[in-house]
Amino acid sequence: MVRRPLILLTNDDGIEAPGLRALEAALCPLGELWTVAPGEERSTSSHSVNLRRALRVRRLGRRRWAVFGTPVDAVFVALFALLPRRPALVASGVNGGPNLGTDTIYSGTVAAAREAALRGVPGLAVSLVEGTDYGPAARVAARVADQVLRAGSGAQAEGRGVLLNLNVPAAPRPGLRVTRLGRRHYPEEVALRRISSASWSARIGGFPVGSDRTPGTDTRAVHDGYASLSVLTLDLTQRDARRRFPGLFARLAREEGGRR
């Protein structure tokens, strides 16, 4: 008998988040689901991982576990301790709120999918841009996940899995836009409040957050009402750095030549 593909589900909003429940319901027909997610909300934790402290792990059901750490912790523990075999896909979400453009740097949702991709497993991060009805976003995610599973080894290259970032409006228009990352503009604000003569509290950020509307970007796609799917890179090398920063590289070349 052919085994169904194993799909690992996780998130950064916590094991009881409604977006995770919606994703479980939507992906259930596609394979054998295992859910391993943070025991508590760990939004904007980026790719943080705990290496110096033991993590509490709690079994909540036959294939459902809570890891009291970051989203990356949850994926790592799942891959190398809890799952009975290697998953065919790791799906992270559905996040409450967008992960567009520069959001992906801070996002725990995206980081969980990235950790999977780094380990050779296709990773899909899913976010609902606005609202609280996670069903439509989860259904779009299921269609993307189905294609990833059907692609098999075609969703892997050079020992890494593909890394996909899906953002879905509350009521998406028909069709899916394949995009590149746009830019999100965060207010550069810090609210300082004095606590005592020698200490303060600082609260970072503010609203509204702005987004560019350049054609072809994820920010433009969701502005136009479409679900956006971006393929993210795991190689952070700036390959055209010499062209982009010629003044710097001219100086570095002189420095390098002077040390020979």
Image (cartoon, rainbow, N blue to C red):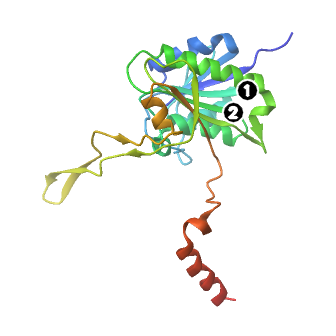
In which quadrant of the rendered view does residue 183 lie? top left
Residue identified by numbered label 1: 88
Question: Can the viewer see residue 16?
Answer: no
Q: Which residue sits at x=70%, y=89%?
A: 260
Describe residue 71's horizontal placement relative to residue 6 as left or right. left
Q: Which residue sits at x=43%, y=35%?
A: 43
Q: Which residue sits at x=49%, y=13%?
A: 135
Say what amino acid the circle numbered 2 marks: Pro
- Whether 38 is drawn above or below 196: the answer is above
**Location of residue 116 in the rendering, given as x and y in whole percent from the top left corner:** 65, 36
The alpha-carbon separation of the residues under discs 1 and 2 comes to 7 Å
Q: Are marks 1 and 2 in contact (CB under 8 Å)?
A: yes
**Location of residue 6 in the rendering, given as x and y in whole percent from the top left corner:** 72, 21
Packing grade of label 1 (10 A; few <14, some 14-19, many >=20) is many
Residue identified by numbered label 2: 122
* Circle 1 SS class: loop
Is 197 or 28 nearer to us in this picture? 28
Is 103 or 228 nearer to us in this picture? 228
Describe residue 29's horizontal placement relative to residue 219 as left or right. right
Say what amino acid the circle numbered 1 marks: Ala
- Whether 220 is drawn above or below 85: the answer is below
Q: Residue furthest front?
A: 215
Q: Which residue sits at x=28%, y=39%?
A: 208
Question: Can the viewer see residue 112?
Answer: yes
Marks 1 and 2, the one that precedes in the sequence? 1
